[in-house]
Image: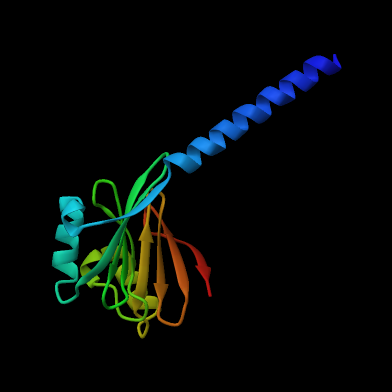
Amino acid sequence: MKRVTATLLAIIATATTAFATSLYITSEDRPVSYDELPAEAKSFIENNFANDEVSHIILDRDIISVDYNVSLTSGTKLEFNSRGEWKEVDTRNSIVPNNIVPQAIAEYIKKNYPNREITEIKRNHTYTEVTLKGGLELTFNKNYNVVDVDD
């Protein structure tokens, strides 16, 4: 019985090591040119950050996803998925362009925080998170109802 247990543990350890190694080997972060961005990402940058220049772009590839991390010369950081859809816009201390903020969120901020502006916005398929000047973070569900406030 001890021999069977030891053999099973050895197999599990080997499989775990092989899986972890494959994750490490298939992960890839490398610089790419502007031309390598998906068309939707380029259009987003041109429409929303026309007065800024791209500093550098990093392709972040792992086993389950591909993301493009774009840094602008102003310090703004943008993240796009493999299709070029924006996932995150972090302007540091300037203002996120109004046209990318969902209308329901913009109205909520205007009503409840009239003197605060959005400096960062993140989204995925289940939530949208915004950070206001001063650091207040608001999380909205997919129906744009506030589900969390974090200062």
How many discs mark residues in the rendered view?
0
Vertical comparison of 140 with 109: above or below: above
Q: Kindly indicate the quadrant of the structure image that contains residue 8.
A: top right
Residue 62 position, x and y percent, is: 41, 44
Residue that extends furthest to the bottom in the rendered view of this protein: 115
Q: Kindly indicate the quadrant of the structure image that contains residue 4.
A: top right
- Residue at the spot 29% in from the left edge and 73% down from the top edge: 96
Residue 5 position, x and y percent, is: 79, 20
Vertical comparison of 18 with 47: above or below: above
- Residue at the spot 24% in from the left edge and 46% down from the top edge: 83
Residue 127 position, x and y percent, is: 41, 55
Residue 6 position, x and y percent, is: 78, 22
Q: 100 or 68: nearer the eye? A: 68
Q: 38 or 28: nearer the eye? A: 28
State left or right for residue 10 relative to residue 138.
Answer: right
Q: Kindly indicate the quadrant of the structure image that contains residue 33.
A: bottom left
Vertical comparison of 9 with 147: above or below: above
Q: Quadrant of the N terminus?
A: top right
State left or right for residue 139 relative to residue 76.
Answer: right
State left or right for residue 110 relative to residue 5.
Answer: left
Q: 73 or 98: nearer the eye? A: 73
- Residue at the spot 37% in from the left edge and 43% down from the top edge: 65
